[in-house]
Image (cartoon, rainbow, N blue to C red):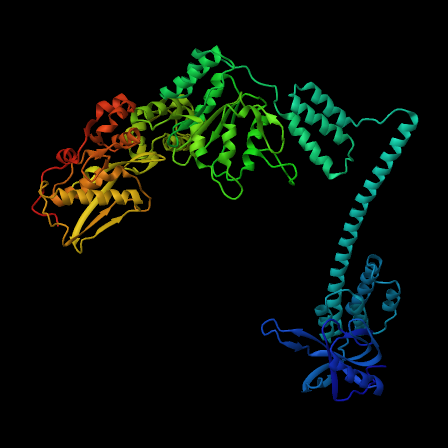
Amino acid sequence: MNQNKTDFPEIMPLLPVREAVLFPNMIVPILVKTEKYLPMIKEAADKSEIITIVMVAEDEKTEEVVLRRVGTAASVAKISKGDEGTVVVVQGLARVAVTEIVSAEPFYKVKVQKLNDVEKQGKRVDALRRNIVRLFKELVTLSPYLPDETLNVIKHVPDLGSLADITSSYLNIEEAKKQQILDCLDVEQRLEILTLFLNEELEMSRMGQKIQSQVQKGIDKTQREYYLREQLKVIQKELGAGEEVPSEIQELREKMEKMRLPEGAHKVASKEIDKLAKMSPSSPEYTVSTNYLDWLLDLPWSEGTKDRLDTKKAEKVLNAHHYNLEKVKKRILEYLAVRKLNPEHKGSILCFVGPPGTGKTSLGRSIAEAMGRKFVRISLGGVRDEAEIRGHRRTYVGALPGRIIHGLRKAGSNNPVFMLDEIDKVGNDFRGDPASALLEVLDPEQNFSFSDHYLDVEFDLSKVMFITTANQFDTIPGPLLDRMEVLELPGYTEEEKTRIATRFLVHRQVKEHGLDPKGISIRPSAIKQIIRAYTREAGVRNLEREIAAVCRGIARKVAEGQESPFIVKGEGVREYLGFPKFSSDVEERTSVPGVATGMAWTPTGGDVLFVEATMMPGQKSLVLTGQLGEVMKESAQAALSYLRTKAKSLGISEDFFSNHDLHIHVPAGAIPKDGPSAGVTMLTALASLLTCRPIRADVAMTGEVTLRGAVLPVGGIKEKVLAASRSGIKHIILPEGNRNDLEDIPEKIRHRLDFHLVKKMEEVLQFALDKPVGPSCN
């Protein structure tokens, strides 16, 4: 039926479809699942009436069904029952536009308007036609769903508009794209859209063909190798030559025999090689087994270095790399002496505890050099998975041994110095507790039979010298700490930092910055200025960074053509480092009553802190601020209770708390603080406020206070005293119970400071409080 000669009624029944687009001149089957449209379809088939077929879509915003504007007028050719509904075969007659919905029940009736193609002629249109035929021809050769007959149909379509419609109906593209072609009345534009869709479909077909070719090639190669291997076995059997052992298997066996494996490891390796020989190289298990054997045979089961047990030479090596640290050096030399007398001595696990930058990690490297051993370091900071220590079992995809086995393989020795860095930062969660896995590693009575989950073979770790490092004790689990001998590395004094910088840091930074050591001189006065005004730390890490900044400034001058020598003195540091970062403000801050200088211990070393107290009219409340922990808050409550009971003897009004609020604040409020050692400082600050007597500017104190005014000992004395010395403090108030801790303080610091050991708060207040500044502080 020719659409140009067909007369259409003005009002037609409409059949909405979801998954089909009907083009003019095409015959297609449509599956109808809705029963209410069947009477209309049967009536149209019996009376040869024309219906309109329009694709529907859902509005993304309202989720309502929306009819497309452009559809196709069609006649019903055949109706048949299917498994999922009624199959209606229809023939497209012409494009039509739905202009009005006349009724919606019991089915749609709509007004339609016939649409005619806008035809064009010319070379461009002819070129588009030829290109479409060429692309479709190539698509037919690649696509299994397009029979060769479709190409003959396309070649013989005279009408360009019908060419686009028929070609589009054959393509396996989205219905929305087909609707886009149906909507287009301009024939030239329709051909352009079709060309775009043809190119996309052709590209997809080419890609699919390439993937299929690669997959088939891999399958063919595997099958071919399998058949050839089976044929080779039969031929060798007939010739009586036996089965030839692959070269890879033979190499593994030779490697295993050369190594002096323990009996258990030899048995496992031999069994694994026999199993590997029976596998096909294309099997996934083959790769897993090969990787396992590589790990098993690469470990230093019997390879080790010979210890250098000359204590004098070892002492020279340690002194050449590290200044001071006498306790640590003494312990290392004692270890070597015992090893010399008893080579089988296992020794204990050393744990270096101290602030950052005090040389813990580099000390481990020096120990390895002194003993003539290999050095391995692994960082445990943030490790939360037990498998990081013990490895994964081979049943898991991508399984590997743990870090202990990794380190031994890297060292190539069964007796290296093995440093476990940052052991205090090991965590635990649902994946296990790494600290518990370390219990076996760090126990000399157990680690001779350490078993990694991946290897599942015992490995002797008793010859390894394990050293651990930490910044603090608190976060190390008790059972793990019990297995280690703790050696503390406290912070350095100003003199020690100056000597370390002069002997080590300056030379290293001058070399790293490509400068001539003969043309540069950083004087001790400059180093002291850097220590006092630009760094405030227990170690020397920031000091080295500032020295590096000075070297960079000199390097720039050299690059710009300035000639040496370059001499940096104390007053010349500012040229390279800018304004000083730190200044001593103790005297300024403690010049008013109610402010006391305390001493605190932190994981990064000691520090001084200020406790401020003030009083205002109120309702008998005590306000505590500055991110204080529960223990520190309780110390403040105890201090207040003591003052209320001793108010009369201290010259304080007994009803001072009746109509007033007290506020205690510890600055640096963003930093959490806790512990009982600030009790003495808080009580002194309150006493200073209530008596209007400022506290001496050159006094710092620490200690726990009881309700009866007794001063109890606290920890971290050495770190606290060093921090106070750096801040310019002259007098230190300590509990009598900390008298023995003074032995750990460097002799030069002890001579520079005056220590006042006290048992009662009366002694503290008598020494620390200065003369009254007036009748009232408020």
Q: Say left or right for 526 vs 331.
A: left
- Above or below, 351 relative to 388: above
Residue 453 image-quadrant placement: top right
Please tell me which residue is depicted at 58% across the width and 35% down the height of the picture: 391
Please tell me which residue is depicted at 82% across the width and 80% down the height of the picture: 76
Q: Say left or right for 559 vs 10.
A: left
Camera-side residue of 550 and 114: 114
> Residue 486 appears at what percent x and percent y?
40, 26
- Above or below, 471 relative to 31: above
Please tell me which residue is depicted at 83% across the width and 85% down the height of the picture: 5
> Residue 156 appears at what percent x and percent y?
88, 70
- Above or below, 666 relative to 35: above
Asked if residue 589 shows in the view, the reply is no
Asked if residue 428 shows in the view, the reply is yes
> Residue 766 appears at what percent x and percent y?
12, 34
Camera-side residue of 541 and 694: 694
> Residue 20 appears at what percent x and percent y?
75, 72
Q: The N terminus is located in which quarter?
A: bottom right
Camera-side residue of 727 and 35: 35
Residue 390 image-quadrant placement: top right
Please tell me which residue is depicted at 82% across the width and 62% down the height of the picture: 136
Camera-side residue of 66 and 380: 380
Residue 731 image-quadrant placement: top left
Outermost residue to the right: 238
Q: Tell me how many marks there are.
A: 0
Outermost residue to the left: 775
